[in-house]
């Protein structure tokens, strides 16, 4: 039995759902999940479906999908084989909480992916990678070595056919060169409830401002810092009694759960990006 996931978007018009579901039915497919959304402002139709087939050739399916549907409705589409495990590279600096959380979920089989390696601009967390038997690459980054460092990162990413990257508290600004090659495939965890408090020290800014709610945000990165399409967010209440250490401790728990949720949405092909925003098919 073969299971595929299909993501479609195109100009909204009548008959799209009927045409897609008839196409699947004509190919003896059994649709086990279907959801759609129409962006009324942009008049754009979005759909995600999962279908099972007893006998299936993905190349034949793609060819006929283009002929019958994609050309007719001028669709942008992607088809994924549900059994394929996307390759995820993790980038980290010195904070260990998100790295530990991802690797323990991976170790327990919670993440349908492969993690070929971990990259860091510091050596501090190499012991964690060794504990989980995952190759660790220390690539230091400074103002003068940034370009050379990113070329080394790109060589690693390409030589391992990496599908997406997770910045698990990677405290370096990623350049356009890497972002262009992995557009909407680099997931960051920012330790604030964006758009509040962008930058490297949001907890200190939150304490100084006297907010009553702190949060964490996972987003795809763009060249503009902390401004990319948001995948997941969560918050926690705080009071005047909480110190900076209290905020950091509360924030760590939020960061771990928000990042793990975003990673799972990405792996399960539940995210579609449009106009620097996301549609999440839960
Ligand atoms: N192009 C992007 N790169 C990164 C983003 C992003 O949104 N776009 N997010 C960051 C993560 N981050 C906040 O979530 C963040 C990381 C680092 C900094 C920063 O100012 N770094 C300094 C160096 C700090 C250091 O060496 O410790 C710098 O790079 O000059 C701000 C925000 C990941 N990258």
Image: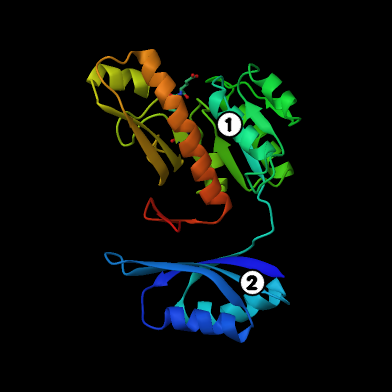
- Indicate the position of residue 196 as horizontal and vertical percent values: 29, 32
- Helix or strand or loop: what does disc 1 sit on? helix
Q: Residue at x 60, y 35 (%)?
A: 102
Q: Residue at x 58, y 78 (%)?
A: 65
- Indicate the position of residue 251 as horizontal and vertical percent values: 41, 26
Give the mark, 2 or 1, whose residue is nearer the N terminus: 2
Residue of label 2: 52
- Helix or strand or loop: what does disc 2 sit on? strand
- Indicate the position of residue 282 as horizontal and vertical percent values: 45, 56
Residue of label 1: 101
Q: As displayed, is residue 73 above or below residue 134? A: below
Can residue 200 be seen here? The reply is no
- Indicate the position of residue 175 as horizontal and vertical percent values: 51, 35
Find residue 282 and name its label: none
Circle 2 residues within 10 Å: few <14, some 14–19, many ≥20: some
Q: Residue at x 70, y 19 (%)?
A: 127
Q: CA distance from mark 2 to mark 1?
A: 32 Å
Can residue 106 be seen here? The reply is yes
Q: How many marks?
A: 2
Using the rendered view, name the quadrant where residue 142 is placed.
top right
Q: As displayed, is residue 203 above or below residue 188? A: above
- 265 or 188, nearer to the observer: 265
């Amino acid at each position: 039995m073969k299971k595929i996931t299909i993501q479609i978007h195109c100009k909204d018009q009548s008959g799209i759902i009927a045409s897609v579901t008839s196409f699947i039915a004509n190919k003896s497919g059994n649709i086990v999940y279907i959801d759609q959304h129409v962006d009324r402002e942009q008049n754009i139709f979005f759909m995600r479906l999962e279908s099972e087939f007893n006998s299936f050739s993905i190349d034949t399916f793609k060819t006929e999908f283009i002929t019958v549907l994609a050309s007719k409705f001028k669709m942008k589409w992607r088809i994924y084989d549900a059994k394929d495990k996307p390759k995820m590279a993790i980038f980290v600096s010195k904070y260990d909480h998100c790295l530990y959380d991802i690797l323990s979920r991976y170790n327990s089989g919670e993440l349908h992916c492969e993690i070929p390696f971990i990259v860091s601009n510091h050596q501090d967390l190499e012991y964690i990678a060794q504990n989980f038997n995952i190759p660790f690459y220390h690539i230091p980054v400074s103002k003068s070595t940034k370009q050379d460092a990113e070329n080394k990162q790109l060589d690693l990413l390409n030589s391992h056919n990496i599908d997406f990257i997770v910045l698990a508290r990677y405290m370096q600004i990623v350049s356009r060169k890497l972002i262009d090659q992995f557009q909407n495939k680099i997931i960051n965890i920012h330790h604030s409830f964006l758009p509040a408090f962008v930058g490297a020290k949001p907890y200190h800014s939150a304490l100084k401002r006297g907010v009553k709610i702190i949060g964490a945000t996972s987003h795809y990165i763009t060249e503009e810092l902390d401004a990319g399409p948001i995948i997941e967010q969560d918050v926690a209440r705080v009071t005047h009694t909480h110190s900076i250490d209290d905020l950091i401790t509360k924030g760590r728990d939020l960061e771990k759960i928000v990042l793990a949720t975003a990673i799972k949405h990405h792996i399960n092909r539940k995210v579609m990006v449009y106009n620097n925003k996301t549609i999440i098919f839960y």
